[in-house]
Amino acid sequence: MAFILGSGSPRRLDLLAQLGVRPDAICPPDIDETPLKGELPVPYCHRITRQKVQAVQADRDDVTLCADTTVALGRRILGKPEDAGQAAEFLHSLSGRRHRVITSVAVRRGDRVLQRDVVSQVKFKRLSDVEINAYLATGDWRGKAGAYAIQGPAGAFIPWISGSFTGIVGLPLSETAALLQGIGYPLYREAS
Ligand SMILES: Cc1cn([C@H]2C[C@H](O)[C@@H](COP(=O)(O)OP(=O)(O)OP(=O)(O)O)O2)c(=O)[nH]c1=O
């Protein structure tokens, strides 16, 4: 049995290492992540994750894991910003409000797929232009859903969360451990 991480995210690799899991292969799938017309954030995140895990080539006995993190402001999906201008727009709209961060995780072995959608809430303090510009200058927003990362300098903007910290970063570890055990991955091997 090989363990295949279907993700190019270095954060997910680090989070898996916290569980003591080291992938035998890293194979990020290439899928179209465009939301459907009118698609809501949780169904979107679930669908994309399912597509990711189905798109990875694996042998029947291999375990494949994929995830997707989606930032949702009400019904609006905030994806990865295309440029600093869009990142600034996202940060202005998150300022002083609560939003949701959804991370869906899927594991597959043969035809069997187990999946969980983990929804957390994140509150941003009201941001000044000076704070937004200083954060944009760090470049930390690049490649991050919603244009921020709680584990980086933007952590200073977040006085409150509810839910799963590791889920907000990109891989909810408690749920991931349960999924891996459910699919038959020997996560906690008996010491011999
Ligand atoms: C909200 C938030 C997002 N993120 C990151 C997690 C994800 O890597 C990224 C969301 O993009 P994803 O599409 O979930 O993941 P990815 O493109 O990095 O990797 P892959 O599709 O190959 O698995 O945003 C943080 O690191 N911290 C945060 O606080």
Image (cartoon, rainbow, N blue to C red):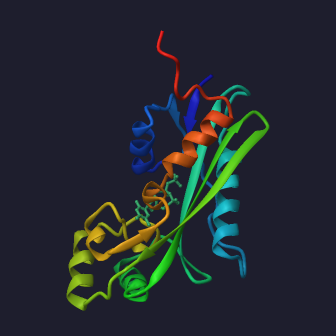
The residue that appears at 71% across and 45% down in the rendered structure is 114
- The quadrant of the rendering that contains the N terminus is top right
Relative depth, front residue between 42 and 84:
42
Relative depth, front residue between 80 and 76:
76
Determine whether, in the image, residue 78 is placed left or right of residue 32.
Answer: left
Determine whether, in the image, residue 170 is placed left or right of residue 107.
Answer: left
The residue that appears at 42% across and 82% down in the rendered structure is 90
* Extreme residue in the top direction: 192
- Regarding residue 110, the answer to whether it shows in the image is yes
Q: Residue 110's spot in the image, x, y percent?
A: 76, 33
* Extreme residue in the right direction: 111
To which quarter of the image does residue 144 belong? bottom left
To which quarter of the image does residue 49 belong? bottom right
The residue that appears at 62% across and 83% down in the rendered structure is 75
Figure disc tally: 0
Determine whether, in the image, residue 57 is placed left or right of residue 161.
Answer: right
The residue that appears at 27% across and 77% down in the rendered structure is 136
In this view, 112 is above or below 33: above
